[in-house]
Image: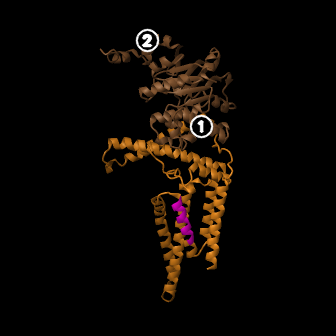
Amino acid sequence: MKHDFIDKHSTLDSVIHRLDPRVKILLCFGFLVLISSSSEIIKMIAYASIVCIAMILSRVPLHHYLKKLALVTPLLILLSLFIYISYVWGNSEHSTTFFLSRHHQVWEVLALLGLKIYLSVLVITLLVSCTRFNSLLWGLRKFRLPRIATTLSKLVYTYLFVFIDELHRTMRAYKSRTPVLRVSRVKVFGSIAGGILLRSIDRSEYIYRAMISRGFIGEFPEGDSNRMKAKDITVAVLFMSLLILVRVIVWKI
Amino acid sequence: MNRNEMNNIDKMSNMIAIKSLNFTYPDGHRALTDINLEIKKGEIFGIIGPTGAGKSTLLQHLNGILKGEGEILVDNIQINDKNEKSIREKVGIVFQNPDDQLFCPTVYEDIAFGLFNMGFTTVEIEEKVSRILEQMNLSALKDLSAHHLSFGEKKRVALATILVMNPQVIALDEPFANLDYRSILKVVEMIRELAMTRVIISQDILVALSICDRIALIENGKVIRTGTPFSIAKERDILVQTGLDYLPYLELIKPFITNN
């Protein structure tokens, strides 16, 4: 059974993949802060071009990013509609006088919102796609994320595979005896879901036994504390300088 | 310690001693009743029995995963809550289903998992994992997810996850199950070559007879016979009773073997 939905692209080899996870996390969060604190479209466009360059360097297929953007698009549309309607209703008595200028303002707000959301999603997708899940957790742990959070995330990650595995097995058994899906048989899905859950719990129990059998005591080992390489520090400094430069130049314009 | 050195070890001393072990699952099913066994240092000990006899349950007691009533001594140390970690470093268990054993994103991380828990440094771990990957011809798979391997490959990786920890005892649950004959022969050869005490659980009495130094026959959670493969093979009535009688099977394939 094949399921590599989380670490699908993290095994690629690119400049960004090779960076230390801590550098990537730092840059990602720095970028998110800059994006959320900026309120000019021109700055956003400058940031977007930097993100595009990073996306090209990452060698992750474009459709992977587009899929993630598609996921948030309905939410963005709903949010935009809500803002637009509340804006128009809130200004109905002045609408004949200020309609055009006010509408121009709301479109700017909506464009800014769209850019912020899309850029944030792209930056996080870039981070997650170019870093192995375990390395990401390791990096977060180095930034003092509580151990309980990383341990739970690792367990969820491990057991997610078990669940998907059992789901595939059960659906294969179901399809082998039900070539055509009948609406009258839909009620069977309730018992199938229960069965999958029970089987997953059962297998999780075995996996846990395998873990403790190899010395697991409730905490995943973190290994040695690796020193950041000069290359990683250089990239971090260069990238942050570029972002600050963009901010300063656009501010002067 | 190499194989020759292992052969020189006094096989009279116990590596594992199980005394009056009883175990009942939380649902009330009594899985083991008054188990008494002694496994000598360096020997290949087989635990044979039909499905549901309690073999896997017994195996999981050997390093304290399951805890029943009674005593289990590993290298003369009784397993308790305080020494669990050191006992698990001494006794490695390879589960029947490799999918239960492999839970890390890559083969490399799976093999390294036990070593990390044992407190080795990254450099030591890299060296040990690379060595075991090379020994078991798994180097090409090290960056793959275990979910993407064939069943035979998964079995080898599961074995590697334990061997890399260099335990004093390796306990293998159905190591020959679902393997083709060539793979079975490879596993048999590999088990023979291991320089440690080996406990094998199997329903395949023919393979067990051929590989084990001593065998315990289990049925309904009780040890009904312990002895050498020859003494067990002679007890036809017991084998028939437990459903492990192999002669009808040999009769079945006899014409093909004798070309008659």
Q: Residues in magenta?
A: A46-57
Please identify the quarter of the rendering in which residue A45 is found.
bottom right
Which residue bears the numbered disc 2? Answer: B236
Residue A54, relative to residue B15: is it above or below? below
Chain identifier of the residue bearing label 1 in the image: B
Residue A213, relative to residue B251: is it above or below? below
| Res A239 visible | yes
Q: Circle 1: is it few (<14), some (14-19), or many (20+) Cα within 10 Å?
A: many
- Amino acid type at image mark 1: Val
- In this view, the residue in front, B31 or B195, is B195
Residue B242, relative to residue B184: is it above or below? above
Q: Position of residue A102 (x, y in %)?
A: 52, 83
Label 2 element class: helix
Which residue bears the numbered disc 1? Answer: B129
Q: Position of residue A11 (x, y in %)?
A: 52, 50
User: Which chain is rendered orange in the image?
Assistant: A
Q: Circle 2: is it few (<14), some (14-19), or many (20+) Cα within 10 Å?
A: some
Looking at the rendered image, the quarter that the N terminus of chain A falls into is top left
> Is residue B250 within the magenta segment?
no
| Res B41 visible | no
Please identify the quarter of the rendering in which residue B26 is found.
top right
Marks 1 and 2: CB-CB under 8 Å?
Answer: no
Please identify the quarter of the rendering in which residue B130 is found.
top right
- With A78 as the anchor, is B108 left or right in this view? right
- Amino acid type at image mark 2: Arg
Q: Total label count?
A: 2
- With A175 as the anchor, is B219 left or right in this view? right
User: Which chain is rendered brown in the image?
Assistant: B
Label 1 element class: helix
